[in-house]
Image (cartoon, rainbow, N blue to C red):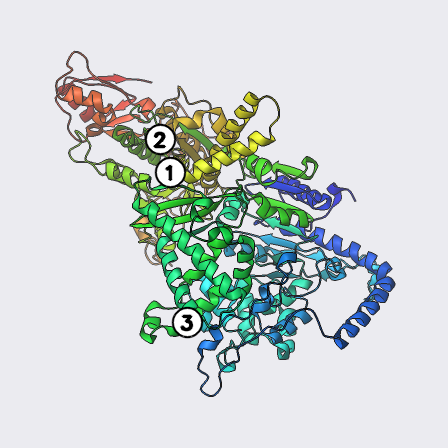
Amino acid sequence: MELQDIDFHHPYSPYDIQLQLMRALYSCLEEGKVAVFESPTGKPCDDDEPEWMLDFAKRESSRMMTEKRKELEERLEKTRKEEEQQRMALENPEGPRKKQKYSTPSTGTGNLSEDQFALDEYDSENEEHGKPRSGLAHSSELSSSTLELLERFKGQFSTGKPGSDDDDDDEVKIFYCSRTHSQLTQFAGELRRVKMPWSIPKDLLSTGLTGDEELEERVKHVTLGSRKNLCINPRVSSLENATAINERCLDLQQPSVAPQHKCPFLPTKDDERQVLQFRDHALATVKDIEDLGKLGKKIGICPYYASRSVVKNSEVSREALNISVKGHVIIIDEAHNLMDAISNIHSVTVSLSQLQTSLSQLTIYARKFKTRLKGKNRSYVAQVIRLLSSIAAHLRSLLESEKAPEGPVLTSDLMSGKGIDQINPHKLSRYLQESKLARKVDGYVEFTKDPSDKKASGNSTVPVLFHIQGFLLSLMNPSVEGRLFYMKENGDIQLKYMLLDPTNQFRELVDDARAVILAGGTMSPMTDYMNHLFSYVPASRLDTFSYGHVIPPENLTAHTLIRGVQGSEFDFTYDARDSEKMIMDLGRTIATLCHVIPDGVVAFFPSYDYLGRVLSIWKKPMLGEQGQTVYGLIGQKKPILSESRDMTVTTEELLQTYAHTVDTGRGALLLSVVGGKLSEGINFSDKLGRGVLIVGLPFPNIRSAVWQAKIQYIEQKTHQQATGSEASRQSAAKAAGRDFYENSCMRAVNQCIGRAIRHRNDYAAIVLIDKRYDKPGIQAKLPAWIKQSMAGSSVQRPAGATVQSLAKFFAKLSTVDKMPTRFSKTRKARGHVSAGYGRIGKHRKHPGGRGMAGGQHHHRTNLDKYHPGYFGKVGMRYFHKTQQQFWKPTINLDKLWSLVPAEKRDAYLSGQKTDTAPVIDLLPLGYSKVLGKGRLPEVPIVVRARYFSRDAEEKIKAAGGVVELVA
């Protein structure tokens, strides 16, 4: 079947762009490609993905069903042989692994004893061969009854070999990953709307279908969340920290815990009926993560573990744990920050105070159990103490030194203590993972705490030794992939391991998966994915796609603004952005933009610190303005709301206030920060986002040690891979580092821009305020659908021209008839039965006539006033029509001097400059008429405008000024 002929079973008629997207995605899955998709609408979290995704899964299922029928006899014979081998293995259970010792739970009172915190005997005989010992990974964390049940359902903890036939028999699954649970809930909602035909061929069915009769098949979908989202045990779910919830859950499963203290919802081998019931209900209909939690409570079984039995039968999954993706499809939505997310996951930070606490706890533990620590346990615990002591000593020396507040650290400097050279880091890493030393030590510390201390400290914090263990494990990563940094802060010093190259951490998934799709509304610029994350993928398997928006081109306008209304050049580089004059002009410019942009306007600033500085300057009194501030000037146009770093007001409360303020009709200006809570995941659609202002370019701090290391790594990697002369390789390396740095900035900018324009009928204006936005290299990194709406070069374009262009844009799109308010004679009678015309049975129903009656006579004035040029076959005749006669933005007399640049204004008002008079041309500044409110200084001034009120003209001339009328 041709790709053009595939029916994706969309519940509605898709847009052409959505069809192109679905066909391209389907083709990528068929060919097993790695692809990056950018689509501001119709991306995977919208309602078109389930169709092509499910159609692909169903076709694969049908194909596999036909093949399996042919191979059935061979598989049955193979299965019989395997069963015979398993039977023989059970009759001879002796194996090479030693039995693991478990501390028995205390009887009688059920109180815990110190014996449970002793380390189990550690056998390292398999270390040289890299074989895992008994009780590793997840299996060591669960009771035998739970493992038996999970093994029966082939769940996550199945002990089958990775290459066994069971893996090959799996239907193709689609692992859908997203950044927020709200998007997963939205995705599940869209799945419910899709109606798919039966995937099994008709010749394999025994339903008696005839002709074109079709069966409808429900999609099998499961959302796999973390314990924090699925735990139904109040004693565990009440903990605030996800790590604390995980550890408490695992602690309750330990054999040493008395039965009455174990989790009552954990499935055991006796709960097979409940697990099957959970599986059937979970697959019966599409359920989101909240539905699974409710289902677990209703049945009385843990949804976190019970949902693992559903994975085998699911076609669409949400990937959250260590689940095999071999031969399956991975779709990552909102993948614009994927590289940063991978780096952050594998980056670890510890402080000197944490190291000292861990040393103290570990030393107390070693002294208490010194008679029971034998062989390898004693050796490895001593190695951990020596290693922590060496790291702590180096951090103390850095803290006491006069070095910079932050900088790089060499691994050799951390491991310079006595006896450190005798430590095998890889063996020590394996020991920390297998022995559960951190859990034993933390359990003993909690056991010996005073009851009042336990109550005061609570249980929501993550044990400090787990932080230290994670950091020690990170030291075992290849040195070329990551770097160590120190940071001094508040009298303490932190040591951070930063992963610089996420390639290898993600490569295993890419190699195993059949296809990998990264999707998002604003994925530009995409070069980082090609050059760094997927640099090892052959070009034939790699693809990028960028689609336009479904809105008409005339519904979006984008402008770069390099000068303010007072002529200041907008240069928000680190060295120039603190200019008070420029910040004042920025405020006046934003006030002017708020005058022409209706409803809600969202402005994004580079950082919280800079937003705070801008607000402090805006609140200073303006010269010659009788105490008025720029902040007050903006507030006259629209109420101002601001996002704060300390979150004194929650994001939800801030958004509710903003939406309510916009709905009142006054509009609102919301000041936010790039990378803040409002810059990602929040949709400012319709009235909430008629304008998006981006102030400056949010480049990361190039002077920080972390970013210097990142750029240095990119340059070194590019230099090694480049060909040609040394000079050309160095040039390519520098260009790659600069490009990586700019891409990080522009991804953040594009995310902010994408907050507006959320559906086909939406419209908005985007204003980029910085002279650097006019550079072709920066504009090239904007999404294609933004670039096609950009206005022409703004090098010689004054702010007034941009204001006029925005006024025309919104005047054209804001033609929806609005209910009259002030001028309607029935304004105060709305809601009353009589509407001001007396008793309903007596008053005339249609005073003045029904509908368009009187449109050519007594109602002609109203039609001409409220809807000029609208009614009639070709519009009513308009005698002596004057173009733009209704465009009359006004300015009061007392505001005229605020339009004069500050340095010139001071010179004129102080009398230093008397040979000339300032000339204010109001039309380029977005004003048409001057009103006579306020007073003027006794200084001559020349004012050019289209209209003047009588009072304004008299006051200007009384001050010795001149009035000039312009067309």
Q: Residue at x 41, y 69 (%)?
A: 367
Q: Are marks 2 and 1 in contact (CB under 8 Å)?
A: yes
Q: Amino acid at mark 2?
A: Phe
Residue pictured at 77% horizontal, 59% vertical:
214
Q: Position of residue 578 (x, y in %)?
A: 29, 32
Q: Is residue 216 left or right of residue 363?
A: right
Residue designated by label 2: 572
Residue 23 x/y as whole percent: 68, 42
Q: Which label lies toward us, 3 or 1?
A: 3
User: Image quarter for residue 191?
Assistant: bottom right
Mark sitting earlier along the chain (2/1)? 2
- Which is nearer the eye, 295 or 171? 171
Name the residue that disc number 1 marks: 606
**Circle 2 residues within 10 Å: few <14, some 14–19, many ≥20:** many
Position of the C terminus by quadrant: top left
Q: Amino acid at mark 1?
A: Pro
**Residue 457: in sight, yes or no?**
yes
Q: Rate crowding at label 3 as few (under 14), some (14 to 19) or many (20 or more) other CA atoms within 10 Å.
A: some
Query: Mark 3 — residue?
Result: 368
The number of discs equals: 3
Depicted 292 relative to depicted 9: above or below: below
The image position of residue 306, as x and y in percent, is 60, 69
In the rendered image, the quadrant that contains the N terminus is top right
